[in-house]
Amino acid sequence: MRTPLVFLIIGIFCFSIFIISRIPTIAQTETITVPDDYPTIQAAINAASSRGTIYVRNGTYYENLVVNKSVSLIGEAESSTIIDGNFTGNVVKVTSSKVSISEFTITYSAGYPTSDQNTNGIFLDNISDCNITENNIENNEEGILLSHCFNDSICRNNITANSGAGILLDSSSNNNICRNNIANNWGGICIGGSFNNNIVGNNIVENYGWKVGGVVLEFFSSNNIVSGNDIANNTNGICLTGDVFHRLDWTSSNNKIYHNNLLNNTNQALCGPAANIWDNGYPSGGNHWSDYVGADSYRGPYQNATGSDGIGDTPHVINGNNIDNYPLMKPYVRVHDVAVLSVTASRAWVYQGFLLNINVTTSNLGDFTESFNVTVYADATMIEEFPILSLAPNIVKTTTVSWNTASAQLYHNYTLSAVASLVPHEFNVTNNFLIDGIITVRLLGDVNHDGKVDGRDITIAARAFGTKLGDPKWNAEADINGDGRVDGRDITMIARNFGK
Ligand SMILES: [Ca+2]
Ligand SMILES: [Ca+2]
Ligand SMILES: [Ca+2]
Ligand SMILES: [Ca+2]
């Protein structure tokens, strides 16, 4: 009769944990509804707790919001939940990190000549980790301004008819700007003094400003990726000049621009003298230029082997430092493609029974945000399976897993590998699987790996005694427990296995 009682006690204990763990969860997911709970969105923000959700029903709200805490604002429907700034200030100003805004129409900020930081549909001011998703942002001066922001995601918005830029980044880095429709603004996506941003899969059309373009990288912006975008019928397709006056002495360098379709822009690309990268190598290719006139009779990295390959035989030259070496003959079609890039262990051997850390690096090489699973193996033994969620295009992610080698076979050479599950419509499957390093599992304490633990192992370890990682006499193999120093604990472990 004891067992059921034990189970009952464990059951009550677990249930208590469940209840205790539920309480903060409920608080975190609190939802306030506008206008049911509060008549205005601002009143709801003021009343909300951090991480709360504010759900806004259809209607037109004449407000200038200040979002100063980490909340999610969700509209009932993108086209009929309208925040109207009434031509005054910013429509929405965000001063807190971790804010989400989705399913709104955001319209009628103040316009020129009000100061730049007060004329935006959405102004993200010195924050990070915000998501602006699936909104209509129209009839403002700037659609969205990011000033000194990082790690934000601006995706799947419809950004139209703004009298400034659709999206303007000022000194902002590591942001993702993906799959937006950016049309009929003065400028499309304009980036100044900003680095490592990812501009992927956007539709950028008919932005009409005389001195701007569909995509503008200026004031020394570098290491940005511009890929998989349709850039069509703008005054200038891509501008890499110093500023809106097309100065050439502040130009941007080392940006990577590939797999875009540059279609019928009045000027396809305007470029200063600084060097940028306009292709992704062979055979991945560069951009499709609607005005490219080259032929396709040859193939290969040097375009000198007989046969066509979809890549123009001659480079598309913008200027001496800006050359698309592999222009695409046909418009680029966006793809789904995830990959395992590397599987590496902290060292090539492990003492049986210890944990071995393995770094698995994956990447999204396609043009869409993807979620997938990664499984890591030692030979056919699964070490761990883990999910990668919402990985944006061009982002590389390294995950560390631990292999418990307690039941691994001694002196066996294990081959490490990792597999990324296929995402829907993925065709390049060969890069989803990667075999990497070999790991030998050794008997604990066998420092000289001759298969037994004896006085010779103690002697070798003693020589490294008192050393730490980097010292001249350091010996990683004598560091049995892998804590970065050889001391009494390591010698004790060898001694415990002595004679095995
Ligand atoms: Ca060719
Ligand atoms: Ca793949
Ligand atoms: Ca030995
Ligand atoms: Ca140690």
Image: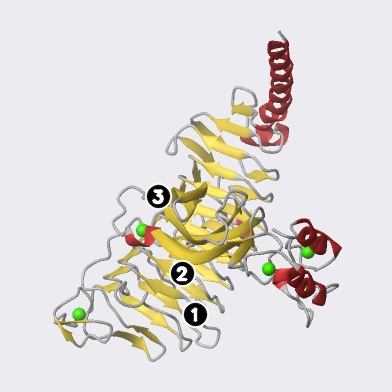
Q: Residues within 10 Å of mark 2 (few under 14, many from 20)?
A: many
Q: CA distance from mark 2 to mark 3?
A: 25 Å
* 62 in relation to 279, above or below: above
Secondary structure at badge 2 equals strand
* 133 shown above or below 347: above
Would you say residue 184 is visible in this rendering? no
Q: Does mark 3 have its CB less than 8 Å from ligand 2?
A: no
Residue picked out by circle 1: 254
* Residue count near mark 3 (Cα–Cα under 10 Å), binned few <14, some 14–19, many ≥20: some
Q: Position of residue 302 (x, y in %)?
A: 26, 87
Q: Residue 217, which numbered label?
A: none
Measuring 42% from the left and 62% from the top, which residue is drawn there? 434
Say which of marks 3 and 1 sits in front. 3
Mark sitting on residue 225: 2
Give residue 464's quadrant in the image.
Answer: bottom right
- Image side of residue 26 versus residue 206, left or right: right
| Extreme-front residue of the structure | 499
Q: Can you see residue 32?
A: yes
The residue pinned by badge 3 equals 421
Determine the CA span between mark 3 and mark 1.
33 Å
Q: Residue furthest bottom?
A: 320
Q: Helix or strand or loop: what does disc 3 sit on? A: loop
Marks 2, 3: nearer the viewer? 3
- The amino acid marked with disc number 2 is Ile
**Depth check, front residue: 229 or 136:** 229
